[in-house]
Image (cartoon, rainbow, N blue to C red):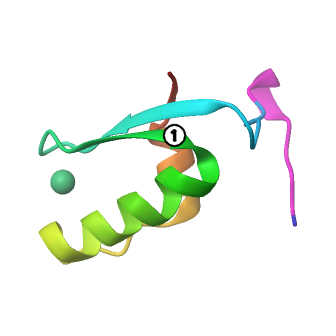
Amino acid sequence: MLRSARDGSEHDESAEYVVRCECGYEVRGPIGTIVPALQDHGHEAHNMQVTREKVLAMAQPA
Ligand SMILES: [Zn+2]
């Protein structure tokens, strides 16, 4: 697994994050939860392919 620590904003796999879609959909939890949740949402609600990188870029510490 690649792990980057750019900007000192490394994502902690055990920390909780919240990520909100532009449509208002919001999901909260550890990275391992929000990534697949938002990928499912993007596909089902927007017919969009959401990458892990995109989820991480949108995630805020909860
Ligand atoms: Zn959405």
- Where 60 sits versus 54, above or below? above
Task: Tell me the chief SS of the magenta region.
Answer: loop
The percent position of residue 31, horizontal first and vertical second, equals: 61, 48
Q: Within 10 Å of the Cα at label 1, are there few (<14), some (14-19), or many (20+) other Cα atoms?
A: some
The percent position of residue 51, horizontal first and vertical second, equals: 50, 66
Local SS, label 1: strand
| Magenta residue span | 2-9
Q: Residue at x 37, y 58 (%)?
A: 38
54 relative to 43 in the view: left or right:
right
10 relative to 55 in the view: left or right:
right
The percent position of residue 16, horizontal first and vertical second, equals: 59, 31
Q: Residue at x 26, y 75 (%)?
A: 43
Q: Quadrant of the N terminus?
A: bottom right
The percent position of residue 27, horizontal first and vertical second, equals: 35, 43
- Mark 1 lies on residue: 29
**Magenta stretch holds residue 53:** no
